[in-house]
Amino acid sequence: MKISLIVNGTAHTIEIEPRTLLVDVLREQLRLTGTHVGCDTSQCGTCTVHIAGKPVKACAMLAAQADGQAVTTIEGVAKGDVLHPMQAAFREHHALQCGFCTPGMIMTALAMVESHKGEPLTEGVVRKELEGNFCRCTGYQPIVTAILAGAKAMA
Amino acid sequence: MHNFNYHRPKTLSEARAIFSGAEDAVYLAGGQTLIPTLKQRLRQPSDVIDLSQLAELRGIAVEKDAVVIGAMTRHADVAASTDVRRLIPALAHLAGEVGDPQVRSLGTLGGSVANSDPAADYPAAVLALGAAIHTPERIIAADDFFTGLFETALEPGEMIVKISFPVPKRAAYMKFRNPASRYAVAGVCVADTAKGIRVAVTGAGPNAFRQTEMETALSKSFTPEALAGVIVSSEDLNTDLHATAAYRAHLVAVMARRAVEALI
């Protein structure tokens, strides 16, 4: 079957099998390998992308379900060589060690800033909203610090 | 995942026709349970029918004394709805505690209720609030809906269109979460409704059920102390690697007390 996706602003028409997962289209067909597969059991959140601005796990969604929708991946976040303020905050605050979870963390962070627009992001909110993203290196502390700093920089 | 035929019908009748014409079809709502299930090959349907384009299944409406929520409404939208937050804050709170933000972006009310997962959150609210489950053919009372482990009163091919939640005088949902999955190890919804006090339990048994001893005790005196005299039996409760039946019985008592404390 054929689907059309707008990925990071670019329209694509893609031939897929009905069973193809969104994450596999992004990684294997569009070669956007910034979206990672950590667990493949819909738990770790490292495959998080945005569909119409909402965070979703791309390993828990058929590509067919995304037909006709706008997808944003980690590759669509920076402006050329200039890091997005959230990415810059992750670097500044050492919010990664191995870095495998980082793309998902940043996509979730951007979604939480968006969904809490107009109210200050608190540490409690950040920790709750991060429940769908696992990091096995940092213990989360620097990630929380970075998200709070990134949110401030975006305001 | 084995391959299947994928359909994206535009109308209810089209969806029903595809279902009846297929060998072994399954409806796809948000997919947050179904997709992982297909990936593990625990289910191998011939046809997957995506309900996302059915306008009849969408939206939140306030009707006389009730909030009516379309089956395809995402958890995040129920949690954020100003109408739900104003009229049934316990339901908005419950929706905001399902899974994690990514699951709440896609997971739906109808999908959760139709699946009748023993540890799902929504069934507790559906039962405690005395909701009515609307399908194209009929209206099913919450008390008749959950019939067993992953089993409901829905006939093959029958789907939930919307659920009508009567607005309670007050209600609260408390759950003890599995720290990894965020499913309810035990969850209790206590509601003070036009039809009396209703207490529903999820996570503890094969499916959500009403705790009638607690309802009787709270009807006499709506206080945490009134619950102290109720012995929660662990008979028929679940034992798994997360908790024994006896521990779940204990948690049911604790969550019920917390819910009542939140309401007085």
Image: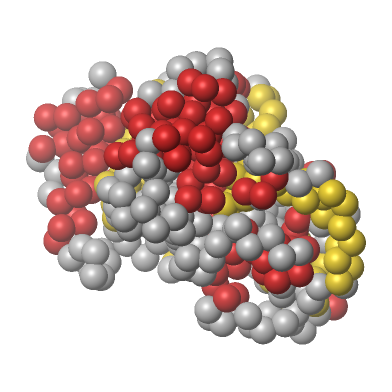
Residue name at image x 17 percent, y 29 percent: B224
Horizontal and vertical percent for residue B250? Answer: 15, 51
- Name the residue nearer the viewer: B159 or B176: B176
- Name the residue nearer the viewer: B124 or A76: A76
- Name the residue nearer the viewer: A15 or A75: A75
Residue B113 position (above or below residue A143) = below
Residue B84 position (above or below residue B255) = above
The way the protein has been coloured in the rendering is secondary structure
Question: In which quadrant is the N terminus of chain B drawn?
Answer: bottom right
Question: In which quadrant is the C terminus of chain B drawn?
Answer: top left
Residue B19 visible, this angle: no
Q: Quadrant of residue B199?
A: top left
* Residue B220 located left or right of residue B7: left
Residue B100 position (above or below residue B165) = below
- Name the residue nearer the viewer: B169 or B18: B18
* Residue A93 located left or right of residue A15: left
Residue name at image x 67 percent, y 25 percent: B63
Query: How many numbered tags mark residues here?
Result: 0
Residue name at image x 14 percent, y 44 percent: B230
Residue A44 visible, this angle: yes
Q: Quadrant of residue B78?
A: top right
Residue name at image x 50 percent, y 62 percent: A42
Q: Quadrant of residue A99?
A: bottom left
Horizontal and vertical percent for residue B62? Answer: 66, 24
Horizontal and vertical percent for residue B185? Answer: 29, 55
Horizontal and vertical percent for residue B21? Answer: 85, 78
* Residue B51 located left or right of residue B142: right
